[in-house]
Amino acid sequence: MLIDFNTLPEHARVWIYQANRSFSEQELEELQSKLNEFIKNWTAHGSDLQAGYQLKYKRFIILGLNQDLNAATGCSIDASVRFIQQLEQEYNVDLMDKMNVSYKQGEYIAHKSLVDFKKMAKDKAVSKNTIVFNNLVANVGEFKENWEVPASESWHSRFLK
Protein backbone atom coordinates (compact mmCIF):
# COMPACT_ATOMS: atom_id res chain seq x y z
CA MET A 1 0.00 0.00 0.00
CA LEU A 2 1.67 3.18 -1.24
CA ILE A 3 1.55 6.15 1.12
CA ASP A 4 3.30 9.51 1.23
CA PHE A 5 6.78 9.01 2.73
CA ASN A 6 6.27 12.11 4.88
CA THR A 7 3.34 10.47 6.67
CA LEU A 8 5.38 7.49 7.88
CA PRO A 9 5.93 7.37 11.66
CA GLU A 10 9.36 8.25 13.06
CA HIS A 11 10.04 4.59 13.90
CA ALA A 12 9.25 3.34 10.37
CA ARG A 13 12.12 1.36 8.89
CA VAL A 14 14.16 2.83 6.04
CA TRP A 15 16.51 1.48 3.41
CA ILE A 16 18.71 3.89 1.48
CA TYR A 17 20.19 3.11 -1.91
CA GLN A 18 22.70 5.56 -3.34
CA ALA A 19 23.47 5.66 -7.02
CA ASN A 20 26.98 6.04 -8.33
CA ARG A 21 25.68 8.68 -10.74
CA SER A 22 22.80 11.11 -11.00
CA PHE A 23 19.60 9.99 -12.69
CA SER A 24 18.31 12.04 -15.61
CA GLU A 25 14.90 13.72 -15.41
CA GLN A 26 13.45 11.03 -17.70
CA GLU A 27 14.95 8.27 -15.54
CA LEU A 28 13.52 9.90 -12.40
CA GLU A 29 10.03 9.91 -13.94
CA GLU A 30 10.43 6.24 -14.87
CA LEU A 31 11.74 5.43 -11.38
CA GLN A 32 8.72 7.09 -9.77
CA SER A 33 6.40 4.97 -11.89
CA LYS A 34 8.33 1.77 -11.11
CA LEU A 35 8.51 2.54 -7.38
CA ASN A 36 4.79 3.34 -7.28
CA GLU A 37 4.00 0.02 -8.92
CA PHE A 38 6.41 -1.99 -6.76
CA ILE A 39 5.14 -0.54 -3.48
CA LYS A 40 1.48 -0.90 -4.45
CA ASN A 41 2.13 -4.63 -4.89
CA TRP A 42 4.66 -5.14 -2.04
CA THR A 43 3.37 -7.68 0.45
CA ALA A 44 4.48 -9.82 3.39
CA HIS A 45 2.83 -13.25 3.40
CA GLY A 46 0.02 -11.89 1.25
CA SER A 47 -0.65 -8.83 3.44
CA ASP A 48 -0.12 -5.31 2.13
CA LEU A 49 2.88 -3.39 3.38
CA GLN A 50 2.36 0.29 4.13
CA ALA A 51 5.32 1.98 2.48
CA GLY A 52 6.49 5.14 0.78
CA TYR A 53 9.61 6.42 -0.89
CA GLN A 54 11.60 9.52 -1.69
CA LEU A 55 14.00 10.24 -4.52
CA LYS A 56 16.57 12.72 -3.24
CA TYR A 57 19.21 14.73 -5.08
CA LYS A 58 18.61 12.70 -8.29
CA ARG A 59 20.80 10.06 -6.67
CA PHE A 60 19.16 8.40 -3.65
CA ILE A 61 16.22 6.01 -3.41
CA ILE A 62 14.83 5.93 0.13
CA LEU A 63 12.26 3.24 0.92
CA GLY A 64 10.26 3.59 4.12
CA LEU A 65 8.06 0.93 5.70
CA ASN A 66 5.55 1.34 8.53
CA GLN A 67 5.88 -1.97 10.34
CA ASP A 68 2.98 -1.18 12.70
CA LEU A 69 0.52 -2.46 10.09
CA ASN A 70 2.58 -5.42 8.82
CA ALA A 71 6.26 -6.10 9.39
CA ALA A 72 8.69 -6.92 6.61
CA THR A 73 9.58 -10.57 6.28
CA GLY A 74 12.58 -12.23 4.72
CA CYS A 75 10.59 -12.78 1.55
CA SER A 76 9.38 -9.17 1.33
CA ILE A 77 12.89 -7.82 1.96
CA ASP A 78 14.22 -10.20 -0.71
CA ALA A 79 11.57 -8.85 -3.10
CA SER A 80 12.72 -5.27 -2.49
CA VAL A 81 16.36 -6.25 -3.04
CA ARG A 82 15.45 -8.01 -6.31
CA PHE A 83 13.55 -4.87 -7.38
CA ILE A 84 16.59 -2.67 -6.65
CA GLN A 85 18.84 -5.12 -8.52
CA GLN A 86 16.50 -4.92 -11.53
CA LEU A 87 16.82 -1.13 -11.43
CA GLU A 88 20.60 -1.47 -11.35
CA GLN A 89 20.56 -3.58 -14.50
CA GLU A 90 17.96 -1.51 -16.31
CA TYR A 91 19.69 1.83 -15.66
CA ASN A 92 23.28 0.56 -15.61
CA VAL A 93 23.80 2.07 -12.17
CA ASP A 94 25.20 0.81 -8.87
CA LEU A 95 22.73 1.11 -5.98
CA MET A 96 23.83 -1.66 -3.62
CA ASP A 97 27.55 -1.09 -3.07
CA LYS A 98 27.92 0.02 0.55
CA MET A 99 31.65 0.64 0.08
CA ASN A 100 31.01 4.02 -1.55
CA VAL A 101 30.56 7.42 0.06
CA SER A 102 28.44 10.34 -1.10
CA TYR A 103 29.00 13.84 0.22
CA LYS A 104 28.26 17.42 -0.64
CA GLN A 105 30.62 19.75 -2.42
CA GLY A 106 28.59 22.93 -2.33
CA GLU A 107 25.33 22.05 -4.06
CA TYR A 108 26.95 19.18 -5.95
CA ILE A 109 26.75 15.59 -4.69
CA ALA A 110 30.06 13.78 -5.04
CA HIS A 111 30.41 9.99 -5.02
CA LYS A 112 33.68 8.25 -4.20
CA SER A 113 34.86 4.82 -3.23
CA LEU A 114 35.60 4.41 0.46
CA VAL A 115 39.30 4.07 -0.39
CA ASP A 116 39.25 7.39 -2.28
CA PHE A 117 37.30 9.09 0.52
CA LYS A 118 39.88 7.92 3.08
CA LYS A 119 42.66 9.32 0.88
CA MET A 120 40.80 12.62 0.50
CA ALA A 121 40.43 12.82 4.28
CA LYS A 122 44.15 12.15 4.73
CA ASP A 123 44.96 14.83 2.13
CA LYS A 124 42.51 17.25 3.85
CA ALA A 125 40.35 17.45 0.71
CA VAL A 126 37.36 16.71 2.97
CA SER A 127 37.00 17.85 6.56
CA LYS A 128 34.98 17.20 9.69
CA ASN A 129 32.55 19.85 8.36
CA THR A 130 31.99 18.13 5.01
CA ILE A 131 28.34 17.11 4.76
CA VAL A 132 28.10 13.37 4.26
CA PHE A 133 25.17 11.02 3.75
CA ASN A 134 24.90 8.45 6.52
CA ASN A 135 23.08 5.66 4.69
CA LEU A 136 23.21 3.45 7.79
CA VAL A 137 20.25 5.21 9.42
CA ALA A 138 17.58 2.66 10.36
CA ASN A 139 14.33 4.58 10.64
CA VAL A 140 12.52 7.72 9.49
CA GLY A 141 13.45 9.67 12.64
CA GLU A 142 17.15 8.92 12.15
CA PHE A 143 16.80 9.70 8.46
CA LYS A 144 15.39 13.16 9.25
CA GLU A 145 17.97 13.92 11.95
CA ASN A 146 21.13 12.03 10.98
CA TRP A 147 21.20 11.32 7.26
CA GLU A 148 22.79 14.58 6.07
CA VAL A 149 25.34 15.47 8.71
CA PRO A 150 28.85 16.84 9.09
CA ALA A 151 31.38 14.03 8.77
CA SER A 152 32.37 14.61 12.40
CA GLU A 153 28.89 13.42 13.48
CA SER A 154 28.88 10.26 11.36
CA TRP A 155 30.74 6.98 11.04
CA HIS A 156 32.87 8.84 8.46
CA SER A 157 34.62 10.64 11.35
CA ARG A 158 36.99 7.69 11.85
CA PHE A 159 38.83 8.82 8.70
CA LEU A 160 39.27 12.44 9.81
CA LYS A 161 42.09 13.40 12.15
Image (cartoon, rainbow, N blue to C red):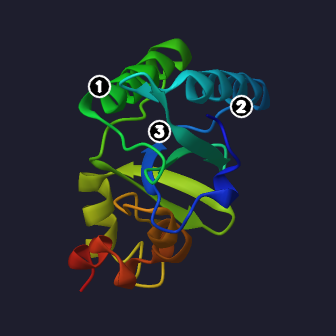
Residue at mark 2: 28
Residue type, numbered disc 3: Asn
**Marks 1 and 3, the one that precedes in the sequence:** 3
Residue at mark 3: 20
**Marks 3 and 2, the one that precedes in the sequence:** 3
From the viewer's side, name the closer residue of 16 and 22: 16
Q: Quadrant of the image for the C terminus? A: bottom left
Q: Residues within 10 Å of mark 1 (few under 14, many from 20)?
A: few
**Secondary structure at numbered mark 1:** helix
Q: Residues within 10 Å of mark 3 (few under 14, many from 20)?
A: many
Q: Position of residue 59 (x, y in %)?
A: 58, 43
Q: Position of residue 133 (x, y in %)?
A: 46, 63
Label of residue 75 in the image: 1
- The residue that appears at 37% across and 61% down in the rendered structure is 138
Q: Are marks 1 and 3 in contact (CB under 8 Å)?
A: no
What is the CA distance from the residue labelled 1 to the residue labelled 2? 27 Å
- The residue that appears at 64% across and 21% down in the rendered structure is 37
Q: Position of residue 107 (x, y in %)?
A: 69, 64
Q: Position of residue 152 (x, y in %)?
A: 36, 84
Task: Look at discs 1 and 2 and give the one toward the viewer.
Answer: 1
Quadrant position of residue 114 = bottom left
Task: Look at discs 3 and 2 and give the one toward the viewer.
Answer: 2
Quadrant position of residue 80 = top left
Q: Quadrant of the image for the N terminus? A: top right
